[in-house]
Image: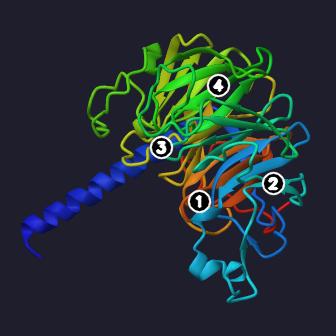
Amino acid sequence: MNSKRRHLIGGAIAGLAIALACAQEAIDEAASTGTEAPRFEVDPFWPKPLPEHWLLGSTIGVGVDSRDHVFIIHRRASIDARTELGAEADPPTAACCRAAPEVLEFDTEGNLVNSWGGPSDEYVWPESNHGITVDHMDNVWIGGNGATDSHILKFTRDGRFLASFGQPELGQEPDSHSETRFNRVAEVAFDAEANEAYVADGYGGRRVAVLDASTGAFKRYWGAYGNAPDDTPTPPYDPDAPPLQQFRTPVHCAEPSRDGLVYVCDRPNNRIQVFQADGTFVDEVMIAPRTLGGGSTWDLAFSRDPGQRYMYVADGSNHRVHVMDRASLQVLTTFGDGGRQAGQFIGVHSIATDSRGNVYTTETYEGKRIQKFVYMGMGPVSAEHQGTPWPSGGRGR
């Protein structure tokens, strides 16, 4: 080995040692100052097996109702018919399997208690359904990010159709100033006290839109930093460039908190922007800012304590969940890792919490599942990245 190569290798090792030392120093500092964060363990036995040889496709939404029942939505068309749907072939080529209905409802124990969804003469089902949330009246809202999806559907929790908001099937050209259509909606969230629905709009548009949750009437909308939204195409994300003054697409979540703030997932910009309910900009935070492609801020959910002290951010590119202090916007720790075993992720897409503090996640792409992470109370922060939160006793709950 020549001298130059030895020096290069020695320098690399020294640099790595310094980086590891700095990371450990940060962890030690957090522990010494008593920093705590919510702790979770995956329940590898939740939910229970589906009936009728059903399979899930890309699972791109999760919501929890007032009974702590968990609703998910998936894309049947994303299942490989040749290799996985032998029972649906004509004639059948195997005893298994079949695509599950689009919407599934589970009770707290993981039992499937209802299923529904799909096209109907009553409404236009999205070309590509995207996002499912349950409002303060236990109604279920569904968006769509297909090329022509420009509306939102509203159902009772047992699947009875209630309303369709926005003109459907208006094509691919976005209009982030329209009050009669949407732009490939990613997700809807709710302010119960104000009876308002916050729309992450979306895969085509570059705005947050606010509706009356009963009538669907438009009330207001805004873009990044509270600016008027601009649908002009933006260049690819550059982590070294100044912050873009518009949202990139998709605007992937818009979650109102109980104290009157709204947290917006500007996914390809790797940031969460915080606003007052009228669209006034308050603050922002970058998360994993050197993430390219799909971005790092896919969805978020708040802890269920009265002050919603913590928030959990699904990061589908880096295959983890960021546990954050909501007031300071500081990432305290993360859990999860890339993989197909329980507690790991492939494209963690959506996230929700129940009244007991448990966290539920769904996975898109080839992840195609829902997982439950059981709240284990508070504990000291011992690692920046916890990895797979496997049950300490070896079994789920």
Q: Position of residue 179 (x, y in %)?
A: 56, 19
Q: Position of residue 5 (x, y in %)?
A: 12, 67
In the rendered view, would you say 99 is above or below 132?
Answer: below
- Helix, strand, or loop for circle 2? strand
Q: Earlier in the sequence, mark 1 or mark 4?
A: 4
Q: Left or right: where does residue 150 sit relative to residue 357?
A: left
- Tell me the number on the disc at residue 217: none
Q: Left or right: where does residue 377 sit relative to residue 301?
A: right
- In-front residue for pair 325/235: 235
Judging by the rendered image, the residue that carries numbered circle 3 is: 296
The part of the image, by quadrant, that contains residue 221 is top right
Q: Is residue 397 visible?
A: yes
Judging by the rendered image, the residue that carries numbered circle 4 is: 198
Q: Position of residue 236 (x, y in %)?
A: 29, 40
Q: Earlier in the sequence, mark 3 or mark 1?
A: 3
In the rendered view, would you say 252 is above or below 263?
Answer: below
